[in-house]
């Protein structure tokens, strides 16, 4: 949807900091629903989980198609997030439970590749459809694909499952985490006003109290939610920090590039989509190879090589932003993705490899939740850095270019 933001801003007469909630709220819902993956795995078989996910996505898609206001479109995206949040952990749980450790890197790479193909083709699909037809048709054309997926899942997804009726979900912990995540993102969005307000402080206090309550219940509650005890493993903590940092910077850049290409360079939504496709596609296809590198060399070499490449590329990119072209943006995004993906996938695989088999479902849920929430924060921060001031003497194109440069500098600092 990022490539359609300039068009949606005009149609609904909203700012960049408002339209970005289409991505932020979607990722927020994905991250929250992912925390329920251990519960869903205990109560339902894979086919049932898959059907729940597709039905939720279909409902959200239909709501988005019928929306004639930004608020209703946002509701549709949030419902779609439920479907994505349900299905994504299922892919990695199947791999973690069935693949020998000697080949875990390769198959985790295949899983990441499959999930990465959507962002690889999504921008170009959205850009072309929005350019020739309109943003609403993006959701309309996805509808039959979702229906076909539903039919295929009913016939092919396995039903073998060991049900755990003793699993009692901790709804209070879930509610506290939801309040903490939502309040924190809402507080960040308040910074668009250019000053620190009482509302911002109030939201941060609510977020802190809710998260403290969540941590307390994680230690004392009898019901199950997320096993935070896995963070006692130092290697997992290190892997998680890198994983979150890469997702944060990735969503910042994914927001900045199409916005810069359209508002600063005057390109169409279709061209903005093409700018992201080579990098996203190459990154997706190389994930199995990166996974194989983990199996052969271990985590250290891929992590160092990927991080070094990412730092160098972001440093050069940030210095050349003000004179950027569509071609240079495309090339830099391609190079950035190649470096980032090498370290990104390795971080998750290396972290989960430190856990016992029973702990990996919780580890998978926590990694996926942190990934999506970091992406939501990254999108919000990028929108703040690229905010256009209508009272400024500088043009929209110049302000957007400066904002993109700030995003790239900020991403570079996170890479360190």
Image (tube, rainbow, N blue to C red):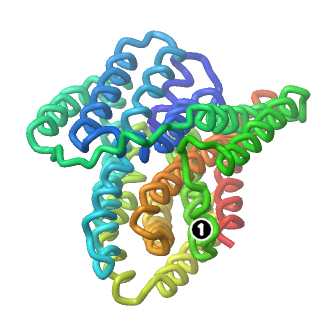
Residue assigned mark 1: 242
Q: Residue furthest left?
A: 155
Could you say where residue 414 lies in the image, as x and y percent from the top left?
68, 64
Residue 398 shows in this picture: no
Could you say where residue 64 lies in the image, as x and y percent from the top left?
39, 19
Image quadrant in which you'd find residue 349: bottom left
Could you say where residue 60 lies in the image, as x and y percent from the top left?
37, 23
Quarter of the picture containing the C terminus is bottom right
Q: Residue at x 24, y 26 (%)?
A: 143
Q: Residue at x 37, y 34 (%)?
A: 83
Q: Mark 1, residues whose alpha carbon is within 10 Å: few (<14), some, or many (≥20)?
A: many
Image quadrant in which you'd find residue 208: top right
Front position in the image: 338 or 32: 32
Is residue 216 toward the left or the right of residue 57 in the image?
A: right
Q: Is residue 264 above or below residue 146?
A: below
Front position in the image: 318 or 64: 64
Q: Is residue 198 above or below residue 108?
A: above
Q: Is residue 145 above or below residue 158?
A: above
Q: Residue at x 34, y 88 (%)?
A: 296
Is residue 380 toward the left or the right of residue 99 in the image?
A: right
Could you say where residue 292 lies in the image, as x and y percent from the top left?
31, 80
Q: Residue at x 26, y 31 (%)?
A: 142
């Amino acid at each position: 949807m990022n490539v359609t933001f300039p068009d949606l801003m005009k149609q609904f007469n909203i700012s960049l900091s408002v339209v970005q909630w289409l991505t932020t709220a979607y990722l927020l819902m994905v991250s929250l629903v992912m925390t329920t993956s251990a519960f869903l795995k205990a109560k339902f078989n894979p086919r049932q989980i898959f059907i729940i996910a597709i039905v939720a996505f279909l409902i959200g898609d239909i709501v988005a198609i019928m929306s004639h206001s930004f608020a209703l479109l946002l509701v549709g995206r949030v419902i779609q997030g439920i479907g994505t949040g349900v299905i994504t952990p299922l892919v990695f749980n199947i791999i973690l439970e069935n693949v020998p450790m000697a080949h875990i890197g390769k198959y985790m790479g295949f899983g990441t590749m499959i999930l990465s193909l959507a962002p690889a083709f999504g921008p170009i699909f959205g850009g072309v459809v929005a350019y020739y037809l309109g943003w609403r048709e993006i959701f309309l054309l996805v509808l039959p694909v979702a229906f076909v997926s539903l039919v295929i899942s009913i016939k092919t997804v396995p039903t073998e499952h060991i049900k755990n009726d003793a699993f009692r979900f901790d709804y209070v912990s879930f509610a506290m985490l939801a309040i903490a995540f939502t309040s924190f993102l809402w507080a960040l969005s308040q910074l668009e006003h250019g000053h620190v307000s009482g509302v911002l402080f109030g939201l941060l206090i609510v977020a802190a109290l809710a998260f403290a309550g969540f941590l307390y219940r994680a230690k004392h509650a009898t019901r199950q939610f997320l096993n935070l005890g896995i963070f006692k493993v130092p290697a997992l903590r290190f892997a998680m920090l890198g994983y979150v940092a890469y997702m944060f910077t990735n969503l910042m850049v994914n927001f900045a590039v199409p916005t810069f290409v359209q508002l600063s360079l005057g390109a169409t939504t279709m061209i903005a989509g093409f700018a992201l496709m080579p990098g996203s596609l190459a990154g997706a296809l190389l994930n199995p190879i990166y996974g194989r590198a983990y199996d052969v060399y271990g985590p250290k070499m891929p992590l160092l090589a990927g991080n070094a490449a990412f730092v160098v590329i972001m440093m050069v990119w940030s210095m050349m932003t003000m004179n950027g072209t569509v071609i240079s943006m495309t090339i830099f995004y391609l190079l950035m993705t190649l470096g980032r993906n090498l370290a990104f996938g390795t971080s998750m695989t290396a972290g989960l490899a430190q856990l016992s088999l029973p702990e990996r479902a919780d580890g998978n849920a926590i990694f996926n939740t942190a990934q999506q929430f970091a992406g939501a924060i990254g999108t919000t921060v990028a929108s703040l850095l690229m905010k256009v001031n209508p009272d400024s003497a500088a043009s929209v194109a110049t302000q957007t270019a400066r904002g993109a440069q700030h995003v790239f500098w900020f991403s570079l600092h996170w890479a360190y």
